[in-house]
Amino acid sequence: ASQIQKDRWLQKLLHLLIEEVESGEKTSLKEIAGKMYQSTSQLNRILKKNWGTTIRLLGDIQLLFAVQLLSTGYDSILSISHRCGFSDQAHLNRKFKRSFGWSPAQFQKKGPVLQDFKWLKNVVTSQTDN
């Protein structure tokens, strides 16, 4: 396959992962692999090759979605943690503080930073279009 086809496939995969996180539904790697017409082991190899690990990529998407939800100020941190797929609020707190240096509560008090999570989709699109 050409590099353009590979880039488009990776873009489609990222969009699917983002949609899965945004939906708040727990989705297995097996289900994602099926939607991308790959075996689970092949999808794992692709993710590892392009982003280091599957877990890190999904975790990054979860954190970015949490940032967007926290910036709106409408939901509780507990609700946001569950909606983003974290096992509990403490898990979100640890990952958030490790990644950004503040707790979700501190971030929420600072006010909206991002207006729309869809900026990530735009970044992904612009990177694969080059």
Image: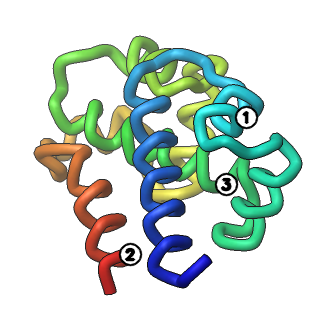
Say which quadrant the C terminus sits in: bottom left
Disc 1 on helix, strand or loop?
helix
Question: Where does residue 60 sit, x and y in percent of width and height?
Answer: 53, 52
Left or right, residue 126 beside residue 96: left
Count residues near mark 2 (Cα–Cα under 10 Å), then give few for <14, some for 14-19, many for 20+.
Answer: some
Marker disc for residue 56: 3
- Which residue sits at x=41%, y=47%? 15
- Chain-order first, disc 1 or disc 2: 1
Q: Name the amino acid type tagged 1.
A: Leu
Q: State which quadrant residue 26 falls in.
A: top right
Q: For marks 2 and 3, give the CA distance.
A: 20 Å
Q: Name the residue under label 2.
A: 128
Mark positioned earlier in the residue sequence (3 or 1): 1
- The reply to whether dot 2 and dot 3 touch (C-beta < 8 Å) is no
Q: Is residue 45 left or right of residue 123?
A: right
Q: Are marks 1 and 2 in contact (CB under 8 Å)?
A: no
Rendered-image quadrant of the N terminus: bottom right
- Work out whether 64 lies above or below 5: above
What x and y, as percent, mark residue 56?
67, 54
Position of 83 with respect to 37 (left or right) is: left
* Circle 2: element type: helix
Q: Distance between the Cα atoms at labels 3 and 1?
A: 13 Å
Q: Name the residue under label 1.
A: 29
